[in-house]
Image (cartoon, rainbow, N blue to C red):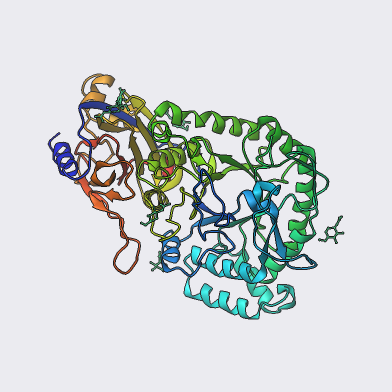
Amino acid sequence: MEFCATLFLFLASMSVVFAQYVQESELVINATLPMAHTDANYICATIDWWPDDKCNYNHCPWGSSSALNLDLSHPILGKAVQAFDRLRIRVGGSLQDQVVYNVGDFSGPCHPFIRMKGGLFGFSKGCLYMDRWDELNRFFDKTRNLTLKELEWSLTTRLVGRNSIHSLKPRNDEFLKLWNSKDSIKALVTFGLNALRGRHQLKKGVWGGNWNSSNTHDFIKYTISKGYQIDSWEFGNELSGKGIGAMVHVEQYASDLIELRGIIDNLYRNFQPKPLLVAPGGFFDKQWFAKLLKVSGSEIVDVMTLHMYNLGPGVDPNLVKKILDPHFLSRASITFGDLRQTIQTNGPWASSWIGESGGAYNSGGLHVSDTFVNSFWYLDQLAMAAKYHTEVYCRQSLIGGNYGLLNKTTFVPNPDYYSALLWHRLMGTGVLEVERINAGPHLRSYAHCSKGKAGITLLLINLSNQTEFQLKVHNILNLNLPTTKPKTGTFSHRIKSTFSWVGSKSTDEKLSREEYHLTPQDGNIRSKTMLLNGVPLELTEAGDIPDLKPAIVDVNSPICIAPLTIKFIQFPNFDDYGCK
Ligand SMILES: *[C@@H]1O[C@H](CO)[C@@H](O)[C@H](O)[C@H]1NC(C)=O
Ligand SMILES: *[C@@H]1O[C@H](CO)[C@@H](O)[C@H](O)[C@H]1NC(C)=O
Ligand SMILES: *[C@@H]1O[C@H](CO)[C@@H](O)[C@H](O)[C@H]1NC(C)=O
Ligand SMILES: *[C@@H]1O[C@H](CO)[C@@H](O)[C@H](O)[C@H]1NC(C)=O
Ligand SMILES: *[C@@H]1O[C@H](CO)[C@@H](O)[C@H](O)[C@H]1NC(C)=O
Ligand SMILES: CC(=O)N[C@H]1CO[C@H](CO)[C@@H](O)[C@@H]1O
């Protein structure tokens, strides 16, 4: 217990609430077989379309962070994105169903979104110039860490790739070869398409008529001709169920999806793999989702995307209270479970993503969503979603609103940015089951296979403001296979007598574990500065993202987690048969 106390005092002196109570709990990790798998690039963030005059609650938190006007050359933006090596980005949001693409036979005026009485969400249509689309794609290049050879190739194609790549022999072959290779250089971009084009309003909030695909067709064709790689095309935003602003009946939606599938299959006929078709990017409605899968039919939709804002309106004065209430947080699991079941029953070919999730809706909570306390909600939901077979989780937003991972004016990362980065670097794709003994609801505990190395990584979140948890962590294998441990006492005695760590080599070798302890500055959970192992996470003088260095701790020392703090713990070796 001595170490626990020392570290605790050390941290307490700078930031942590003093614990009034200490609770001893145990975790049993089942690393024999992952219960679910995420995509290797689980973390995703959105770039929205909202213009600077989008306001909520007399506050206009978007600035210039729209896909149409974000400063893509801002050095901090580039570095923040590159730190992920490969950050998934979704371009989409409420206004996406009013975006027109200035390409092909599009002949209307091309102007940005303008405030308009009676317009959907209070705005006119907005237009994407292909020059801007080119800029966005140059930026997306930064979302992956290109090798030199790839970079060279990419530049050459960009320079030559004026028209269709099919007219570009022999570059064409080279392009296809690279695209099809195992180390595909595909950027991880999801682009949300306008699914209201050509429709008309039947009555308030209900849109009907066939989707006019011609503008989308020309846009995708242009995108291919330039060699821009799109991971997935998404159809529509929040038009499912009763819709937000607008809804489209599910039969109509399904038939339009089949048309879009045809367009993608045709335009990408020489490509393998083809971009995914993702839909509906909306809130869960069991009947609507089930019918979409049934009516569109087998292998039309690759991914069902769910939007989730389970904290309610951003203006709610109880946001912090909700975030710290374990029962409130857990309610999201009902939706995850329902979605999982709906897909398994009606369209088992489809996987599920969180297409958009910002915690609190209407641009997030002012001085909440951009502070330390939001990471309790964010990390908990990332982990919860993964347990329910969510393969990708797109955070609203990368930048813009109160919930941006980056501050919209300074581009400086908010606490959740570092939470996302730590998850991305530490948590592997295998999701492991954690059994809890004497833990209580305020301790949230999750485990994944470690990323890129042996062993497992725990995520511990202490929502309690008064209880420190002291933990023993067991491997379920060791409990079930008595031969690996000294055969003394009964089963329960053995649980009690094993120390905090029970890996296969723990008795013989001096092993260490790596701890990333996250606390708020000055113990203020609404601080915009997060500390990692007691050190503020701030950009370096050169404007670089700081190193995220773990504390190296003897693997046999007790594990503790102070009130209102978060910890990632990476165990070096865990008989992790299920993680290979
Ligand atoms: C471990 O988890 C896997 C996957 O959920 C399950 O099949 C297996 O039965 C679990 N093992 C034990 C010992 O509980
Ligand atoms: C990019 O890749 C190179 C070579 O693989 C590596 O040395 C470098 O650290 C990577 N950069 C980032 C930001 O991960
Ligand atoms: C779709 O829109 C284009 C112009 O954007 C128009 O030329 C075409 O006639 C429309 N198609 C249908 C079926 O209405
Ligand atoms: C962005 O940073 C500025 C300057 O530090 C701060 O005043 C502002 O509150 C921040 N905005 C948000 C939305 O966090
Ligand atoms: C802990 O939270 C409860 C409920 O929000 C509050 O009443 C109490 O004063 C807090 N205790 C401490 C030590 O902050
Ligand atoms: C105020 C508070 O957070 N109380 C909880 C702290 O955590 C313990 C253990 O889960 C609970 O029993 C308290 O109610």
Image position, residue 33 (x, y; %): 45, 37
Q: Residue at x 47, y 71 (%)?
A: 147
The image shows residue 347 at horizontal and vertical percentages of 68, 37
Q: Residue at x 33, y 29 (%)?
A: 481
Judge from the rendering whether residue 72 lies leftward or rightward of residue 443; answer left or right. right
Vertical placement of residue 200 versus 203, above or below? below
Q: In the depicted view, which residue is nearer to us: 477 or 557?
A: 557
Q: Position of residue 275 (x, y in %)?
A: 65, 56
Q: Quadrant of the N terminus?
A: top left
Relative to the observer, which residue lies in front, 465 or 457?
465
- Residue 513 seen: no
Question: Taking 31 as reference, is 155 left or right?
Answer: right
Can you give x and y, in whole percent of width and height, for residue 260 in the image? 76, 52
Query: Toward which corner of the image does residue 376 lie, by quadrant?
Result: top left
Task: State how many labels appear.
Answer: 0
Q: Is residue 50 visible?
A: yes
* Residue drawn 64% across the image and 35% down it: 343
Image quarter for ligand 1 equals: top left
Up-down: is 137 above or below 20? below
In the image: residue 473, left or right of residue 291:
left
